[in-house]
C-alpha cells in the first residue's frame, strides 16, 4: 500500500491516463485521455452520484465531476465541468459546444460495445465554450489521495 491508497488502485492508475483538475470552488474533475481511459473512468471510477459529461456528437473525453457528500454543484460548477469536456474533445477550437450532462448512474456500457462507447438513459445538454483556464491541473493520484483523507 502506498500512503492511503490500496495497491489495486495504484496499479489501475499506472494503466490509465486520466487528467485531473480542481475547480475554483474545490470540486474535482477527471477526464479520460483515450477510449480505454474513458471506459475506466465511466464504468469503474465513477460513483452513481458523480456527474458525467461528454461533447455531443464528437469524439472526446468522458469527464467526471466528483460528487461532494451533502452538496449539490452549482449551475456554474456544472458549466465549468462541461467546458472541460468541450476542451477535451474534437471541438476544442470551436465557439459554442453542446455537452451532455447527467449523473453517472444513468451511463451504461452496452454489452459488446466497443471501448469508450456508452449509452445515456437520462440527462440534459449544456452549451459551453471549451475552456480549462479557470481550473487547476492536478496529478491524478494526488486527487484520489485527497479524497481518502
Image (spheres, rainbow, N blue to C red):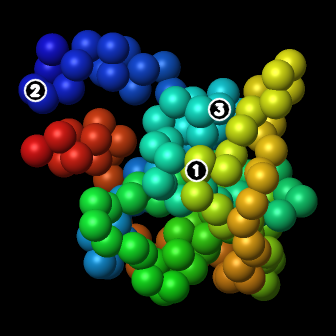
The residue that appears at 68% across and 46% down in the rendered structure is 107
Which of the two discs, 2 and 1, sits closer to the camera? Answer: 1
Q: Choose between 141 and 51: the one closer to the eye.
A: 51
Cα separation between marks 2 and 1? 28 Å
Comes first in the chain, label 2 or label 1: 2
Vertical position of residue 60 compared to residue 9: above or below: below
Residue tagged 3: 39
Comes first in the chain, label 2 or label 3: 2
The image quadrant of residue 127 is: bottom right
Q: Which mark is residue 83?
A: none
Query: Is the C-beta separation of discs 3 and 1 under 8 Å?
Result: no
The residue that appears at 46% across and 43% down in the rendered structure is 47
Residue tagged 1: 104
Cα separation between marks 3 and 1? 12 Å
The residue that appears at 65% across and 75% down in the rendered structure is 130
Comes first in the chain, label 3 or label 1: 3
Residue 52 location (% of width, % of height): 60, 56
Residue tagged 2: 3
Q: Choose between 20 and 103: the one closer to the eye.
A: 103
Residue 34 location (% of width, % of height): 67, 36
Residue 72 location (% of width, % of height): 39, 73
Amino acid at each position: 500500500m502506498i500512503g492511503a491508497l490500496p495497491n489495486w488502485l495504484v496499479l489501475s492508475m499506472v494503466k490509465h491516463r486520466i487528467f485531473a483538475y480542481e475547480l475554483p470552488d474545490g470540486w474535482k474533475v477527471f477526464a479520460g485521455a483515450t477510449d480505454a481511459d474513458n471506459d475506466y473512468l465511466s464504468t469503474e471510477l465513477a460513483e452513481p452520484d458523480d456527474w458525467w459529461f461528454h461533447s455531443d456528437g464528437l469524439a472526446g473525453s468522458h469527464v467526471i465531476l466528483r460528487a461532494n457528500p451533502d452538496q449539490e454543484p452549482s449551475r456554474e460548477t456544472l458549466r465549468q465541468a462541461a467546458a472541460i469536456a468541450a476542451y477535451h474533445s474534437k471541438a476544442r477550437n470551436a465557439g459554442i459546444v453542446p455537452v451532455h450532462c447527467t449523473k453517472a448512474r444513468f451511463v451504461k456500457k452496452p454489452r459488446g460495445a466497443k471501448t469508450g462507447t456508452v449509452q445515456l438513459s437520462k440527462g440534459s445538454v449544456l452549451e459551453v465554450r471549451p475552456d480549462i483556464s479557470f481550473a487547476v491541473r492536478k496529478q491524478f493520484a494526488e486527487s484520489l489521495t485527497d479524497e481518502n483523507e
